[in-house]
Image: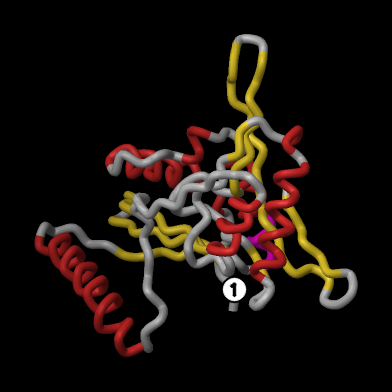
């Protein structure tokens, strides 16, 4: 579901908050309805969408909806809303005014790229060290006699999905991170539908790092312009 905030007198839609209504076992005879942001882990979450300059107005409308509709949910878990959201501070304040008790935490280990600096600083401080690490790893493989190449796949990506998700599961287990595809069975059909649609638009690409016919790594990217 998506909460939409509109201004009929001027711009139409001015803000939105994508949400997911989960159902979890509460008791033997009752399932708990848990309202959470659309997204379940560090690589999949959505901000509060808001026109710049109208943060307080949008936040007030969203908080008011939660206050007026307690029958729509049993548990309200608005976590994974990033600080990069336009108006997250206003959202917290308006939730407090609406009678909720939001807690702000920065304990999650999100992978963040600071885009406030110019390109030269980004290239020197972030991109160059990453590329140097990549070159070192490729050279190590070459010293071990392992020849690799990158293959790009833009059609038939679903043929590789089982291997991709298997390796994704291994990585999540090694990093002790949750696997959204195990926790939420509807995620795989959703991903498959997106891939089918995006293939027709040229918006998706799968990169394979291979040695001979052995796939060593997968990289799935959404593309636009």
| Residue placed furthest toward the top | 28
Q: Residue at coordinates 30% horizontally, 55% vertically from top-left?
A: 212
Question: Residue 37: image x %, image y %?
Answer: 59, 48
Magenta part of the chain: 196-201
Residue 24, magenta (yes or no) = no
Q: Residue at x 55, y 48 (%)?
A: 39
Q: Is residue 159 visible?
A: no
Is residue 180 placed above or below 114 in the rendered structure? above
Q: State whether the magenta stretch is mostly helix, strand or loop.
A: helix
Tell me: residue 13, above or below residue 72. Answer: below
Q: Position of residue 38 (x, y in %)?
A: 61, 49
Left or right? Give the position of 77 relative to 200: left
Residue 129 location, quadrant: bottom left
Give the residue number, with chain letter if any, for mark 1.
224
**In the displayed structure, does residue 20 sit left or right of residue 169?**
right
Question: Which quarter of the rendering shows the C terminus?
Answer: bottom right
Density class for disc 1 (Cα within 10 Å; few <14, some 14-19, many ≥20) is few
Q: Is residue 198 magenta?
A: yes
Q: Quadrant of residue 15?
A: bottom right
Which residue is more in the foreground, 151 or 169? 169
Q: Is residue 55 visible?
A: yes
Q: Image height check: is 209 above or below 131?
A: above
């Amino acid at each position: 579901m998506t909460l939409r905030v509109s201004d009929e007198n001027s711009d139409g839609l001015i803000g939105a908050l994508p949400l997911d209504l989960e159902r979890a076992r509460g008791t033997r005879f009752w399932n708990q309805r848990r309202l959470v942001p659309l997204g379940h882990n560090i690589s999949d979450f959505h901000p509060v969408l808001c026109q710049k300059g109208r943060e307080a107005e949008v936040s007030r409308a969203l908080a008011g909806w939660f206050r007026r509709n307690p029958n729509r949910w049993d548990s309200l878990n608005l976590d994974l809303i990033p600080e990069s959201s336009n108006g997250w501070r206003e959202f917290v304040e308006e939730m407090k005014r609406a009678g909720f008790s939001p807690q702000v935490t920065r304990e999650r280990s999100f992978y963040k790229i600071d885009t406030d600096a110019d390109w030269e600083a980004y290239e020197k401080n972030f991109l160059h060290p990453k590329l140097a690490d990549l070159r070192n790893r490729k050279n190590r493989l070459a010293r071990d006699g392992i020849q690799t190449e990158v293959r790009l796949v833009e059609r038939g990506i679903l043929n590789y999905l089982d291997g991709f998700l298997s390796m994704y599961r291994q990585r999540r287990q090694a990093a002790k991170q949750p696997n959204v595809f195990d926790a939420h069975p509807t995620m795989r059909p959703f991903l498959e539908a997106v891939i089918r649609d995006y293939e027709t638009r040229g918006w998706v690409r799968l990169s394979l790092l291979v040695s001979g016919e052995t796939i060593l790594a997968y990289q799935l990217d959404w593309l636009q312009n």
